[in-house]
Image (spheres, rainbow, N blue to C red):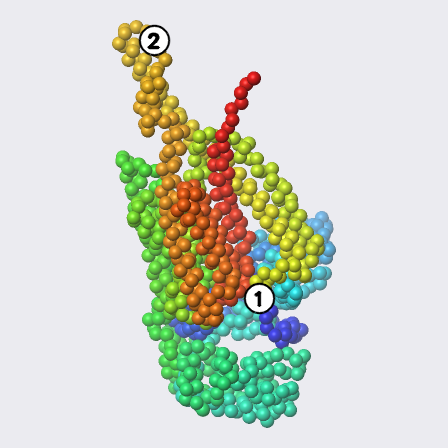
Amino acid sequence: MLRSPARTWIGLAMALATLAAPSVSRGQTEGSSSPQTAPAESAYQALGRLVLMHEGRRKPLDTVARQEVKAVTGRQSFEPIGPDGTTGPEWGPVAALFSWSNAPDFWDDQRFILAEYLPLRRMLLSSSIDSVLRAVVDDPETSEGLKQRVQSILDRKATTEGPDGIATVDELKSIARDAGLPDALQDPVEALAHRIDGHEKFLSPRELEEATVPIKGRQVRFDQWYIDIAMRSRPDPKTNIPPTLSTLEKKVGEVFNRLTRYQAIRGDHGSGMLGAEVNVDRLVPRPANAKYIEFLGLVREKYDAFVEGNKDELNLPSIDRVKRDMRDVKVITLEAPGGQEFRLDQFLAVLVDVPGADFNPVERDALSTLAEYYGDLPAEDRKVPGTDDDADEQLQAWLMADADWAPVALILESDLGQLAQAGYDRDELNRFREAILAAKETEADEPGSLAAEQAEAVVASTRALAADLSTYPTVAEVDREVHYNTFAPFYKAPTYYGLGFALLGLCLMIGTISGGAAGTIRKSLYGLGLLGLVGGIGLEIYGFALRILISGWAPVTNLYETVIWVALIAAVIGLVLEAIYRRVYPAAAAAGVAMLCTIIAANAQSVLNPNIEALNPILRSNYWLTIHVITIVSSYAAFALALGLGLIGTWFYLTAPYRRDVGMGELSRPLMAVPVLAGLGTVGIYGSYNGWASASESMISLWGLGISGADILFFGGWALAAAGIAVMVMVLSGLLGEVIARLTLRNQRASAAEGTTTSAEATVEAVSSEGGGTATLTRPSIAAIKARNAEMYGHGGDDPRERAMRDRAEQVKPISSFVYRALQVGVLLVAAGTILGGVWADYSWGRFWGWDPKEVSALITLLVYLIPLHGRFAGWIGSFGMTMAAVLCFNSVLMAWYGVNFLLGVGLHSYGFAEGGNQGAVLLSALVVSSLAFGAIWRRSLAKREITPTVAA
């Protein structure tokens, strides 16, 4: 997603200045083709134990490499494609990250940056496509017919906007097959066709940096295209609602972010300050000793004296404000250019170019450290280091726990004497410099050739230097996190849950047979299914134990953890119910819910971030995380289990036999409304995009969200279209259920009829043998009919329909009981969690309840689920009502859990907000699942109607 341009205008100005400067590409080197041998994994595995500060947390390089390489390439390990189109050996994450930062001349020409959206890839390669097509036209050996065809493709680009004007893969393949194409041009044409046919999804950094795309009749550089989109994506100042971006524009932001991540890793920000912020060079903690605190005090005094003595040269409108910057203001204002606001750390960069600003790199780094520290302190606590013992103790604690680490360039390039003055150990600095420089030189000379001894030397020297400066993770802590990365328990859990769900599902299909071969098979499936469920639970418990030990916090600190926690707790509750009642249904539903949640967590990581990151300050309380957040999320697990049970029950009700068959015409009657709803919805959506209502004037305001007339048309249109989809799914599911019910009943009747024929033949034979002549059959009495039916059908002589109805009732009754138990657990947890959340809110924000969207959604969920519980207790609803409520009420959980974070994104719970979320897919899934319940309700309501017989005249 495009990042909103929240920085100051100076960032945009610097980016535009970068665009205006002449582009100097890196020179091609002899090593630009892919290495023929794979990197030595043992060396890079050893290097993965190196620790660095990344996004506010100390992490092994193994963790950082997996995150960053996947962010750029879409996967943790990848095979780069060389300039000649040959695929190189597989690179692991640590090897790739280390090589990116030390051998950029090699990597700039390798194709590894993910650009999976085909229309965008065609536009980015449009210059290469045009060059090849022009070569085809200019070649004298090309046939005239082919020249005309290719020229028409080139002419189309001048008149058609976007990817539609660029040659398609089919056109390129057709050109490559044409007999009039010279042999020398066949390979280039086929290579380009291969790159845009969906098989190869990667571009090289150089291709992206030099790419130009056709926009409104002119060629625009890729980075300029991104900036133009970023400027247009700013929220409307009146409604605070950003404009809707096309899929192509969103994909531009994603690819640009990948490019700038790589640029930052290789050591430059080629696209200015609008690019991604990535720091993978924070290897050494800043000293947390008395010598460094004394050094900070000296630098602070030097800074104050410089600002006071150079106020005329600095051209500052209010030098007193700048002088107080260390104490009570966080930004300073320069008159030029344009009066932009600079944060203090940006002002420090300006000092480099100010005459008389004699601050060496170590001193400027110290000022940046102070700026970071003072930023979260009240004015009265921003004291000069070394002048107050209590303030120095607080500063030292911050340096040990929260301060950012020093960039490796500072350690390698600064004067040893200056570093020693700041509190670094000179001997350990020398050993660290020798080890890291040797490793960098080896990697730069031959990518992937790092030796294990060199990697171990880097790790050992870094640990020796850092341990003398501040707190540093132990070897056991580092090994634990690396093991968590490689073992990946949450990626293995779906397999076990899926196995359990499949086997328990087969067990349910076999039924309640207890004897014979079928009974033995059922018992085996049941036992193996439970083993799969227990295996998934064990993997999740182990995974959570590792995450807790790594992060130091209770689980459920981000959306990813809520999903896998719901999977775990749903599985545990289902296993407990199964251990008590032994009816298969709870275990099967729990395995299904856990499988679905863990699959989503493993495959939706653009939305659910699995990384263990620094915790938001407001969440840094294991006490409240445990008693509030875990309680609320565990209630979601109970409701999800009820949903799984409800879906099993919904299937039984959809296919249940009733006293009469429902006509297909009766079931299909609502389909007549589908075209009307779809048409009205299309009109509303079309009108929202074509100015039928104002998009800038807010008509309704809710929770700070301004809703315009165009928004009402848009969402109203989608609501009507969704209603059409719901009606269609409802009818189709009802028709499917009716067909299955009739087929099932027909089979039972056929079996019963076969039994009746056999019995009648036996009676005739018996009568004939007794009388020795022809048997005469008389009409049986009512008592005889009942006796014969009882012999054939059992249960007092019911016909097959009655018996099927009774059997189905026996199947669904325990399901509704389990739903009831799950809802009781869920309501208890959500009620307790909501109350405890109010207590935490009073502690953190000074009020118990503030009608925040998250608070309101939790209250709505509680009230929604109280309705079926009270209805069951009062006798208003039975098994059918409980089953349907389990499915339909889950929409309130979905809104509280997903909707507030991804759809609304407003309120005090902003630490849980996220962009993206595949809202359309989630809403469609919820609509389809709810429509299945409506299908069961619709079919049941028709089957229960009394049909008045028609009396003939």
The residue at which mark 1 appears reads as: 3
Task: Kindly report which numbered mark, 1 or 2, lies closer to the viewer in this rendering.
Answer: 2
Front residue of 403/893: it is 893
The residue at which mark 2 appears reads as: 776
Image location (x, y in percent) of residue 461: 38, 79
User: Residue 566 falls in which quadrant of the image?
Assistant: bottom left
Label 1 Cα neighbours within 10 Å, binned few <14 / some 14-19 / many ≥20:
some
State which tag comes first along the sequence, 1 or 2. Answer: 1
Image location (x, y in percent) of residue 101: 49, 72
Q: Amino acid at mark 1?
A: Arg
What residue sits 37% from the left and 80% below the top?
467
Does residue 733 appear anywhere in the picture? no
Front residue of 866/518: it is 866
- Asked if residue 480 is positioned above or below residue 950 in the image, the reply reads below
- In the drawing, does residue 29 fall left or right of residue 535? right
Label 2's element?
loop
Does residue 876 appear anywhere in the picture? yes
Label 1's element?
loop
What residue sits 43% from the left and 83% below the top?
395
- Asked if residue 407 is positioned above or below residue 919 in the image, the reply reads below
- In the drawing, does residue 664 fall left or right of residue 822? right
Q: Amino acid at mark 2?
A: Thr
What residue sits 38% from the left and 68% below the top?
623
What residue sits 43% from the left and 86% below the top?
391
